[in-house]
Amino acid sequence: MATSKYLIFGAGFYGENALIQYGSDNVDFFIDNDSKKIGTTYHGKEIVSPAKAAELCKDGNYTVIIASLYAESMAAQLEELGVKDYSFYLSPVHGMYETDELIVNPYLQQKEAKSEEEWSDSQKLEFSREEVNKAVERLYKNLPLFNHVEIETINRCNGICSFCPVNRNSDPREKAVMSEELFKDIIRQLEELQYSGRITTFSNNEPLLDDRIIDFNRYVREHLPKARIHMYTNGTLFTLDKFKTLVEVLDELIIDNYNQELQLITPVKEIVEYCETHPELELNKKVTIVLRKPQEILTSRGGDAPNRKDLREYPDDRCLLPFKQMIIRPTGQVSLCCNDALGKWTLGDLTKESITDVWYGTKFTKVREALYKGRKFCGNCKYCDTFTMG
Ligand code: SF4
Ligand code: SF4
């Protein structure tokens, strides 16, 4: 019998967006693993446990939509419960912010940690660790090409974020700017690979400090039509004209609006006004302005975050990022991951080696072997508390 209704697995940020996509009338329940949520309602729908969802699915009347970054283990969980009819809300190269909200306040969803201890103790971290370990298991056995490329064209930032190793008061890096020739050569290689993952022209820097950034993104768009182009910026250097030109080229623009009181900074105010007075352009679908605090406790970044001193060790955990990311510095050097902001761990050099030779090469392979066994086998990774799915 054809299914007629949906259950959404994940009563959170992505679940909310899935509800909009599938239509509230077509969704009967949310499913969640969080025992505190079960029995309560979310957007007017009861939240049920996975076991109860399996009961509901027995008659074949429901399809489960998995709407979470942890989709992989949720799918395994459904299979164990005998649920076969499920699909995924997020594609493997989903957007960074799957929301139509123009302005997002992340502190409404996730409480700010008041101390390093509180940060380390957070439940979210515990849950992510398990998910990462499972995902590495799969990718280690069958490594695909990277699906996330960051090309840092200039290694500078004008920001002062206390948690960031490259804030303008802490940055020890020698200034470097990528040559146009190297940039185009990297894109040519990706074009030959018919690259269709995520790509961005920034990494640990402020991309608008590079005057060529709009032209570079146009070049990417022209040569990599299947790729998903996004950009993060702190927005300080935007003029309205620059914003309008850039947003046309990108698939997604995230403006991290840094202000301790969560007020909009002047260039961003102008952008918000423009977006709001031009609803016909639907810029809210591409642009997300995230209200962020420049003074905040966040991840330790392998021990490099300037405001982290109390470093816990995660010796036996794995890490997913070197199984997914290709992080390229202005010199052509390839770094361990996006958290290796200072480029301490170089796994290749694109002025001498091809991008696939680096990805499948000895250094990357050794790093993955080490991280499969546990972070204690890979440099300073044991001090890193990043457990993202990438
Ligand atoms: S977090 Fe971003 S804006 Fe802040 S200092 Fe680092 S690179 Fe700059
Ligand atoms: S554990 Fe190592 S590879 Fe993973 S994010 Fe941290 S520093 Fe990067």
Image (tube, grey):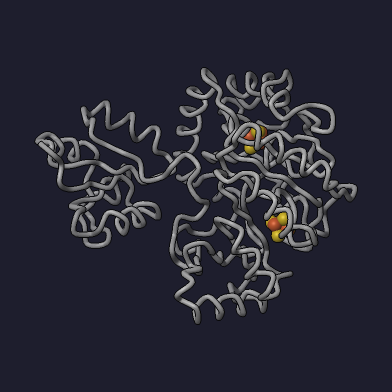
| Quadrant the C terminus occupies | top right
- Does any portion of residue 222 appear in the rendered image? yes
**Residue at left 60%, top 78%?**
269
Q: Could you tell whether 294 is left or right of 62 in the image?
A: right
Q: Nearer the viewer, residue 152 or 351?
A: 351
Give the percent coordinates (x, y) of residue 112.
Answer: 53, 59
Q: Could you tell whether 320 is left or right of 156 in the image?
A: left
Q: Nearer the viewer, residue 32 or 348?
A: 348
**Residue at left 36%, top 45%?**
89
Q: Nearer the viewer, residue 25 or 366?
A: 25
Give the percent coordinates (x, y) of residue 377.
Answer: 67, 22
> Compared with residue 337, is residue 7 higher up or lower down, i.e. above or below?
below
Q: Could you tell whether 103 is left or right of 221 in the image?
A: left
| Quadrant the N terminus occupies | top left
- Does any portion of residue 377 appear in the rendered image? no
Quarter of image, ligand 2 = top right
Give the percent coordinates (x, y) of residue 143.
Answer: 56, 23
- For this orientation, the residue located farthest to the right is 174
**Residue at left 20%, top 36%?**
51
Q: Could you tell whether 9 is left or right of 320 in the image?
A: left
> Compared with residue 300, is residue 19 higher up or lower down, i.e. above or below?
below
Image quadrant in which you'd find residue 170: bottom right
Q: Exactly how many numbered labels are in the figure?
A: 0
Give the percent coordinates (x, y) of residue 15.
Answer: 34, 52
- For this orientation, the residue located farthest to the front is 222
Image quadrant in which you'd find residue 349: top right
Q: Nearer the viewer, residue 344 or 122?
A: 344
